[in-house]
Each structure stands twice: as C-alpha cells, then as structure tokens.
Image (tube, rainbow, N blue to C red):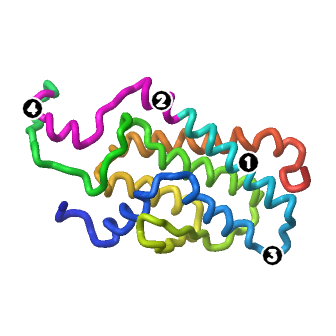
C-alpha cells in the first residue's frame, strides 16, 4: 500500500508477477514476426532463447542458495535485529505481491529478461527490431510493449522493485548475469554466421 508507487508502477508489478519463462516467448514472437524471416532461423532463435533461459535458471538458483540473502519483507520486519542502529522494525510491512519461497539475490526475472534480450539482439545482428510485446496471465491477459530491448529488461527489473520482493542490487546483478549468459548461448553459432547456421 505504498503511497510512493504510482498506478503504472503497480500495473507493471502485477504484470510481471507471472513468473514462468513462457511470458518471455511473446517478446521472441515479436522479433520473428518480421517479414523476410524463414522457419529455420525462427526455430534457431527459439532454441537459443530456451537454452539461454535454462542456463539462466540454473545459474540464478545456484547463486540464490549460495548467497542465501533475505527478502525485503524479512529485512523490514526484523529491522531491529540487523545490528544497524539506523534501521527500525516494521512488523506489518508486506510486499505488493507474494514473495517466492526462495532467497532474494539475484533476481530470477532480471536474469531471464536479460538473457532473452541478449539472444534476440544477437539474432537481429544490428538490424532494427519491431516493437516488442508480450501478455501476462497475472494481469488478466494485458499486453505491454517496448521500443527497445533495454527498455524491456529495465521494466522487468523495475517491476520486481515495485512489487517489493527485490533490492536493486539483485535486479542489476541478475540483468548482468543474464546478458552474459545470453551472449554465451549465441557465441558458438555467431562464429559460423548466426543467420545462416
């Protein structure tokens, strides 16, 4: 019930409450809907995105359980127990959406969005992309659109802050991890011409 979160920020948080990788397929479908693409290239793009997302999920959960960092709700509700005199406890604080039952750091949504964006960027090979879009079951099928991959990744990361389930460090680290994983997923085929492999 934060008075600082705008109505649009609340909508964005609710949109990205859906946390299965399938929400990212709409972004890929936006890229493959361009004229002049063939079935084989589109299949390669979907396969590379799926590989990158699988690798991202493995990486993010390994990191989450390595760092085992508490979520904002736990930290805020226990602000008097953190050994820092400047923090105070707020036992009634709750996030906008229910926090997943795994550690906070790094952000899974951020790593997925950035991995998808890196693969789509490699596939585009410098060509302009169309407006990207996807729909969300947690937002009653609403569709959101982005004019760039960077805007898409930033919105996903911001959504997790607006929802009250991540810190900025988790979203920026997740996005950096995702970019690198997406680059690695396309590195092998890039060496032998991504478009014609």
At which x and y percent is residue 60?
Answer: 51, 35
Magenta-colored stretch includes residue 98: no
Is residue 139 positioned above or below 179 on the image? below
Is residue 130 positioned above or below 154 on the image? below
State the quadrant of the N terminus. Answer: bottom left
Q: For the residue labelled by badge 1, is the local secondary structure a helix, a strand or a loop? A: helix
Task: Give the CA separation, mark 4 to mark 3.
Answer: 58 Å
Magenta-colored stretch includes residue 68: yes
Quadrant of residue 14 within the rendered picture: bottom left
Q: For the residue labelled by badge 2, is the local secondary structure a helix, a strand or a loop? A: helix
Q: Residues within 10 Å of mark 4 (few under 14, many from 20)?
A: some
Name the residue at 56% across, 68% down.
134
At which x and y percent is residue 121?
Answer: 69, 56
Q: How crowded is mark 3: few (under 14 residues within 10 Å), some or many (20 or more)?
A: few
Task: Give the CA separation, mark 3 to mark 2.
Answer: 40 Å
Q: Name the residue under label 4.
A: 80
The label on residue 35 is 3
Task: Give the CA separation, mark 1 to mark 2.
Answer: 22 Å
Name the residue at 31% across, 66% down.
10
Which region shows up in magenta? 60-81
Query: Disc 4 vs disc 3: Cβ atoms closer than 8 Å?
Result: no
Q: Mark 1 points at which residue?
A: 48
Query: Disc 4 vs disc 1: Cβ atoms closer than 8 Å?
Result: no
């Amino acid at each position: 019930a934060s008075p600082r979160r705008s109505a649009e920020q609340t909508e964005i948080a609710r949109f990205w409450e859906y946390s299965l990788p399938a929400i990212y397929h709409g972004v890929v479908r936006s890229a493959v809907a361009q004229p002049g693409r063939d079935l084989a290239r589109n299949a390669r793009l979907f396969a590379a995105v799926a590989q990158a997302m699988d690798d991202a999920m493995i990486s993010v959960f390994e990191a989450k359980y390595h760092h085992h960092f508490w979520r904002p709700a736990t930290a805020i509700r226990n602000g008097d127990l953190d050994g820092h005199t400047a923090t105070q406890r707020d036992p009634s604080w709750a996030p906008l959406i229910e926090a997943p039952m795994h550690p906070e750091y790094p952000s899974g949504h951020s790593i997925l969005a950035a991995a998808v964006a890196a693969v789509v960027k490699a596939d585009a090979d410098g060509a302009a992309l169309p407006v990207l879009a996807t729909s969300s079951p947690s937002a009653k099928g609403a569709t959101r659109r982005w004019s760039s991959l960077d805007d898409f990744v930033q919105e996903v990361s911001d959504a997790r802050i607006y929802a009250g389930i991540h810190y900025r460090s988790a979203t920026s680290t997740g996005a950096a991890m995702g970019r690198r994983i997406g680059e690695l997923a396309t590195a092998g085929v890039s060496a032998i011409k991504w478009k014609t492999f």
